[in-house]
Image: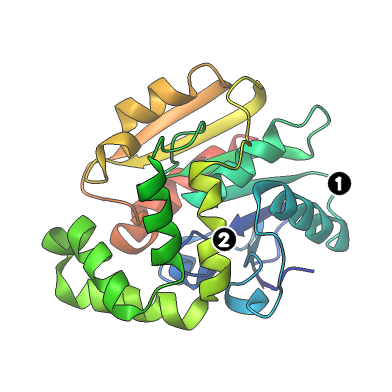
Amino acid sequence: MLGYDVYGSGQRGVIVLNDWVSDTSSWDGVRPYLSTESHRWVFADLRGYGRSIEQRGECTVVEAARDVLELADALDWRTFMLVGHSMSSLIALHLAQQPATRVSRAVLITPPPPASLGLDPASVAGMEALGGGDDAQRLVALRGMWGERLGEGWVRYKTRRWRETADPRAAAAYQRIFTCDGVPSPAAPVAIPGLAIAGEQDLPPLRSSAVAEQYRGICRQLTVSAISDSAHYPMQETPPLLASLVQQFLAEG
């Protein structure tokens, strides 16, 4: 079963998943702003990350979705709310697409395009190499994407946390979720309420206008919120605001 940490003792169960670069410790700065009386937050690390770093697997959307349901069963949650970030947004979307889904509400934070990033074979190979790469490779990649805005200190911190919290073999395998996994299906509707949170300083395909366009035909009840001064990691860039947006949406369910 996935490793996890429980925060709060409320009646409403929320499972929070990690992204491609690190485990759910990226949420540590958000915790002081979360309600522990109304919600029970379960921060779960996917196979190969954090508390689950020793767990091997196929590292696919389908496997991860099964793992989430296994965890919900262990918690004795018939239904639950689910928060995905970047890569794990697609895991949340896949679970929400199931005909008898147990997810009552889904939050997709900086979600990538549901049908894949549309990368050419060389770029796919580059992502796989980056996932399994060393600090030097990852420094170059993170510096190129967000270093100018967030600074060298943040880039080095993020690189170190990638090394400390992720098995390179798992990270290399999970890149298929972005590129060629085939699920979630862009043709399968999602009936439950969803919230997508986009950072307007993120890469163009991940900004609010693009997210609204990409998810319009899939999510029937989707609200798209934009954080103007955040890129891909609002849980670290704007933690109080992210906590407020997530909690307001979950409280409506």
Residue located beneath label 2 in the image: 173
Q: Which mark is residue 133?
A: none
Q: Position of residue 230 (x, y in %)?
A: 26, 50
> Which image quadrant: the C terminus?
top right
Going 48% across and 18% down the picture, which residue do you hit? 216
Q: Is residue 85 visible?
A: no
The residue most toward the front is 122
Q: Quadrant of residue 150?
A: bottom left
Q: Nearer the viewer, residue 86 or 178?
A: 178
Q: Nearer the viewer, residue 31 or 218?
A: 218
The residue carrying pointer 2 sits among few (fewer than 14), some (14 to 19) or many (20 or more) residues within 10 Å by Cα, namely some
Going 60% across and 34% down the picture, which residue do you hit? 252
> Which image quadrant: the N terminus?
bottom right
Q: In the rendered structure, which amino acid carries the disc numbered 2?
A: Ala
Q: Quadrant of residue 151?
A: bottom left
**What element does badge 2 sit on?**
helix
Mark 1 and mark 2 lie on one chain; the one further toward the N terminus is: 1
The residue carrying pointer 1 sits among few (fewer than 14), some (14 to 19) or many (20 or more) residues within 10 Å by Cα, namely few
Q: Nearer the viewer, residue 81 or 165?
A: 165
Q: In the rendered structure, which amino acid carries the disc numbered 1?
A: Arg
Tell whether 69 sits left or right of 229. right
Going 33% across and 75% down the picture, which residue do you hit? 159
Going 27% across and 78% down the picture, which residue do you hit? 136
Question: Would you place residue 192 above or below residue 199 in this image?
Answer: above
